[in-house]
Amino acid sequence: MRVRGVAAARSPAFRQSVAVLLATRALVWAAAILSARALGARSKVNASLNDAPQLTAAVGGAGRVLLTPLAHWDSVWYLGIVEHGYGPLGGGARLARAAFFPLYPLLVWLASGLGHSRSVQLVAAFAVSLAGLAGAFYLLHRLVTLELGAEHAVPVLLLVALFPGALFFGIPYAESLFLLASVGAFYAARTGHWAGAGALAGAASATRSVGVFLILPLGLIYLYGPRADRSERPRSGGQLHPRYPVRANIAWLALGPLGVAAYSAYLGLGVHHGDALAWMHVQALWSRHFAGPFGGLVDGARAAWNGVHALITGSASKIYLQHGELEGERAAVSDVALFGFALAAVAATIGTFRRLPVAYGVWVVAALALPLSYPADAQPLESLPRFLCVLFPLFMWLALWCRERRALDAMALVFAGLLGLFAAQYAAWEFVA
């Protein structure tokens, strides 16, 4: 095992993955620290309302300068779960904790020495996220090399790591862990390790609710490939007829839904909740509603149209009544930008189906089904960049598209600029859509 670990550490995949991680996280950290020093909590209302327990400022001195600017918004919720668990939560908005799945805060709790202190918890939250991101980048390098060839591995990593939504990698959010579990599940399936694929899918569904849908692409890989199992050979048949026979090892995929099942059982049987689907029912507390399958796209288009009209006519403060004049203009720009992300995601999804095995496209559609069917009331496509950043098949297609048009450097520069802007806004306690 030690020899294998040393060999992995010396491999090009490991070195290149670490290099991409360090370079891109340095950009995020620099932008966040400079913004925090120059602007402070630009939105003091957001800071006071969302970090009332001061969980994200638990460290002092250099630690506060380095860590606190990148531990805002949902970081407070995760750190609250690390410190207090899921209950007793009381009524009202505190019930909203149930929306945050348990694997990430559980790992942080363990890494912090079972919740040793707030400062240790904050450091552990960063450590778990960064370790998860390192593992995710390494496995993604291996997966891309297997699927597309080694020459595409670094471009894919760069595009994933520089995408504006990649702000949420390596900080106290669950995105790094979810990327690790989902990429790992795909890589395990592609290489014929079905126990690992099922276990990692289970870890994904214990991290975010959409992880339960990993069973769909994994099942497609099992039945239709591509597969690297040496003991299996594809058999002929119709287009819909499985190319590979079903064997007993398909049962490992049943591990996939266990993460969400275990969390639901805890919520249903635990003395503090009694509602197995509380993680779904509390979406109303986050101002989300069911708008029909992918209805968020329609609502997002309408919001973008209203945003364009508001900016052209100068009526943003009237249309966005809950905001002041400046905030209304920012909300209008955000609606337009979010719809731009949605259009780009639709184009990339079509490209994914055209250029990659069908399982990759199915995963993208399945993973976007929940957030795009439950839009937010104020901004229908709220948090869409964060939902997109973990959908690695989109970036595999984008790398192919960019290399064929020699547009990789330009795309990376655009992504880097937007990522720096997102980090600066986030550090100033401005909401990053």
Image: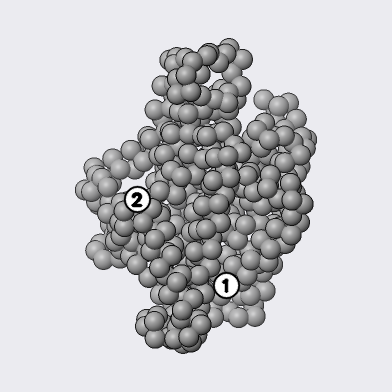
**Distance between the Cα atoms at labels 2 and 1?**
32 Å
Say above or below: 412 vs 377.
above
Q: Determine the residue positioned at 21% across, 48% down.
A: 274
Kindly state the secondary structure of the residue where label 2 is placed: loop
Say above or below: 7 vs 379.
above
Q: Determine the residue positioned at 53% across, 53% down.
A: 345
Specify the label residue 293 is tagged with. Answer: 2
- Residue 130 at x, y percent in the picture: 61, 50
Specify the label residue 184 is tagged with. Answer: none
Q: Nearer the viewer, residue 306 or 57?
A: 306
Q: Determine the residue positioned at 39% across, 28% down.
A: 254
Q: Amino acid at mark 2?
A: Pro
Sequence-wise, the earlier of marks 2 and 1 is 2
Q: Inspect this view and state whether residue 18 appears.
A: no
Name which quarter of the figure residue 168 lies in: bottom right
Q: Amino acid at mark 1?
A: Gln
Q: Nearer the viewer, residue 107 or 267?
A: 267
Kindly state the secondary structure of the residue where label 1 is placed: helix
Quadrant assignment for the N terminus: top right
**Which residue in the rendered view is the most extreme toward the front?**
238
| Residue ID for mark 1 | 425
- Residue 155 at x, y percent in the picture: 72, 47
Q: Nearer the viewer, residue 423 or 186?
A: 186
Q: Determine the residue positioned at 55% across, 15% down.
A: 234
